[in-house]
Image (spheres, helix red, strand yellow):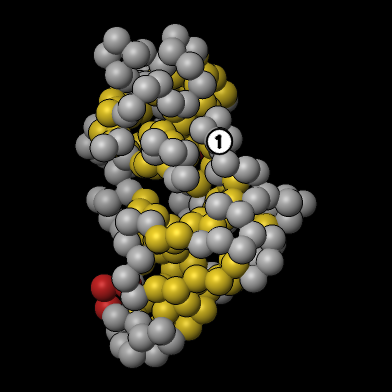
Amino acid sequence: GDSVTQMEGPVTLSEEAFLTINCTYTATGYPSLFWYVQYPGEGLQLLLKATKADDKGSNKGFEATYRKETTSFHLEKGSVQVSDSAVYFCALPNTGFQKLVFGTGTRLLVSP
Amino acid sequence: NAGVTQTPKFQVLKTGQSMTLQCAQDMNHNSMYWYRQDPGMGLRLIYYSASEGTTDKGEVPNGYNVSRLNKREFSLRLESAAPSQTSVYFCASKAFSGEHNEQFFGPGTRLTVL
């Protein structure tokens, strides 16, 4: 079935460090792929998405490229800030598109 | 627009008590969802409503019921709360079925069952 695997956290970085959070997926066909972010005490909000293979989604300095060869959608940012501290979820719609399938989330902690 | 709103924000129940979590969206979305979030398990779908008048079970429906009251509102009911239902509950909505559309989430309800 459809599934998403994310790297275990927490990821602890100093401000201005480079960030990579790995995400791989299993799915039928080539669904859209999403990254959601959850700031402390809040609900999830869409960070970026890619709707087809080789697309790059980007927002707020974050980027992710849809790689069908490696079934991956890794999240990257060149220089993280303390305000990026949050939990990041990779997700895709299930076959039939009734729901989103989420990874378990990766907590990012950025220190000054 | 307020987006997706949920009430209450926090709730403490005793085992066996009942309660209803309320969710409303003002974006004229067709689809609505209830998730629970537990440490290390990501988000799991409890129930969803693809359109007004329809509801379907998700991955973890046992112990819950839902009502799609109208296009705006989708409530989640716990008839007899159990400690295993201690969790953070999120409501979400989506404009319409289809893979490209994002879901919009509410701020969550933190529920503790003693």
- Residue A85, how many percent across, how many down? 43, 39
* Residue A80 screen position, x and y as percent: 44, 25
Q: Toward the viewer: B83 or A28?
A: A28
Mark 1 belongs to which amino acid? Answer: Gly
Which residue appears at 44% of the width and 68% of the height? B110
Residue B100 drawn at (x, y percent): 55, 30
Q: Which residue is mark 1?
A: B98
**Nearer to the camera, A95 or A66:** A95
Most extreme residue toward the right is: B1
Q: Nearer the viewer, residue B106 or B30?
A: B30
Compared to residue A61, the image places residue B70 above or below, namely below
Q: Residue at x 30, y 36 (%)?
A: A2
* Location of residue A35 by image quarter: top left
Q: Residue at x 61, y 63 (%)?
A: B53
Question: Which chain does the residue under circle 1 lie in?
Answer: B
Residue A41: percent from left, percent from top: 48, 56
Task: Indicate the quadrant where residue A59 lies.
Answer: top right
Residue name at image x 65 percent, y 66 percent: B73
Helix, strand or loop for disc 1: loop
Quarter of the image with the C terminus of chain B is: bottom left
Q: Is residue A107 visible?
A: no
**Which residue is outermost to the left?**
A8
Along the line of sight, the residue nearer the viewer: B8 or B47: B47
So how many labels did they put on this image? 1
Question: Up-down: is A31 above or below A86?
Answer: above
> Relative to B64, does residue B53 appear above or below in the rendering?
above
Q: Quadrant of residue A22?
A: top left
